[in-house]
Amino acid sequence: MAQLDAFFKMLKDTGASDLHMASGSQPMLRISGRLERIKYKTLEEDELKALLYEIAPERLVSVFETTGDLDFAHTVPGVGRLRCNYFRQERGVAAAFRAIPENVPTLAELNLPGILGELAMRPKGLILVTGPTGSGKSTTLAAMLRHAADNRRDHIITIEDPIEFVHTSSNCLVNQREVGRDTRSFATALRGALREDPDIILVGEMRDLETIELALEAAETGHLVLSTLHTVSAAKTIDRIIDVFPGDRQAQIRSALSESLSAVVSQTLLKRADAPGRVLAMELLLATTAVRNLIRENKIFQIPSILETSKSHGMRTLDDCLEELLANGRIAPTDAWRNAVNKTRFAASAPQSPAEA
């Protein structure tokens, strides 16, 4: 049993999402979005390094010593999986551990819209789940992939860095590949996946031009592709994809994206006002004919208007979701205002000065 296992058990027992350990500091837990210190001594670098190296695979210790950065997944019996990130900082080594549930949650358990299940059953297209770090993107994608695995009879390939949720081959065959261990890069694995007879490809993150281009190609050639981006709205997600490419290629990419895009799910997690924990706020854009035309014609700025007028199609704006959560007492007025796109809409219930925007 590793010495860190006691901290990992505390992570699970407190319902925290993350554990932080840094040289020159006490360990800290992120509970309901806020960091809380653990009543434990300040960790010195040599002591922390010994704790961290005890659970790191031997082949990766030299990688960390050389680069100062390391990502990997670790399983603790009775606790679950953890996404581990080691890094160097001014006072020495540090680490962040993200809790990953042992069992892949269902869409119903996460209280996610049923339309996400419908999207997971589509034969082809590009589905993007976006949001800031720690907004639950991986969990949403895992639930969608579980729905597909339980209800389709297809081949699913995931490309992750590192592998987080471990999926079982129920009705589908699921092959999970980890960057650095099973393949050199996202782009290399994506290029190979097109020759591996996949029906669904999950790309952990679209980090660069080559990966984005290959994901678009896979979606265009009859595969269902799911991935993430660190963007905060549907419109900004589309802009980000197009802006990655040189100006002379952007018209071509707009055309490809307009044909291949199925949906953009933009989400954030907010502190609950009615109970411990956090609650999900979501914006959902579906690629209707009108949306595809706006992408093709470079009128992305009109997408918020489409979201407002297309609720009957299952679309929703972030502000509508925030208003619903606020009306049900699940979030505080200040949090609704702080995360809103149209802050005027929430100003009456949470008046703030412009400096606090």
Image: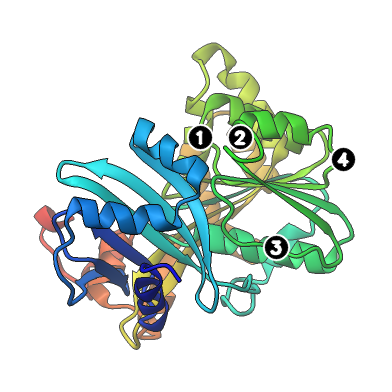
Q: Is residue 38 left or right of residue 269?
A: left
Residue 348 percent coordinates (x, y):
21, 72
> Does residue 35 appear left or right of residue 192 in this picture?
left
* Comes first in the chain, label 4 or label 3: 3
First in sequence: mark 1 or mark 4? 4
As measured in the structure, the alpha-carbon distance from the residue carrying label 2 to the one carrying label 3 is 19 Å
- Tell me the element at label 1: loop
CA distance for labels 4 and 3: 19 Å
* Residue type highlighted by circle 2: Phe
Residue 167's disc is 3
Quadrant where the N terminus is found in the figure? bottom left
The percent coordinates of residue 198 (x first, y second) are: 83, 44
Q: Residue at x 55, y 38 (%)?
A: 206
Instruction: Assess whether mark 3 and mark 4 are in contact (beta carbons under 8 angstroms).
Output: no
343 vs 298: above or below? below
Q: Which mark is residue 197?
A: 4
Location of residue 106 (image quadrant): bottom right
Residue 132 visible, this orientation = no
* Distance between the alpha carbons at the discs numbered 3 and 1: 23 Å
Spatial CA distance of label 4 from label 2 is 17 Å
In the rendered image, the residue lying farthest to the right is 153
Dot 2 falls on a residue whose secondary structure is: helix
Q: Which residue is mark 1?
A: 207
Count neighbours of disc 4 (C-alpha within 10 A) and say few if under 14, some if 14 to 19, many if 20 or more.
few
Q: Is residue 286 above or below residue 352?
A: above
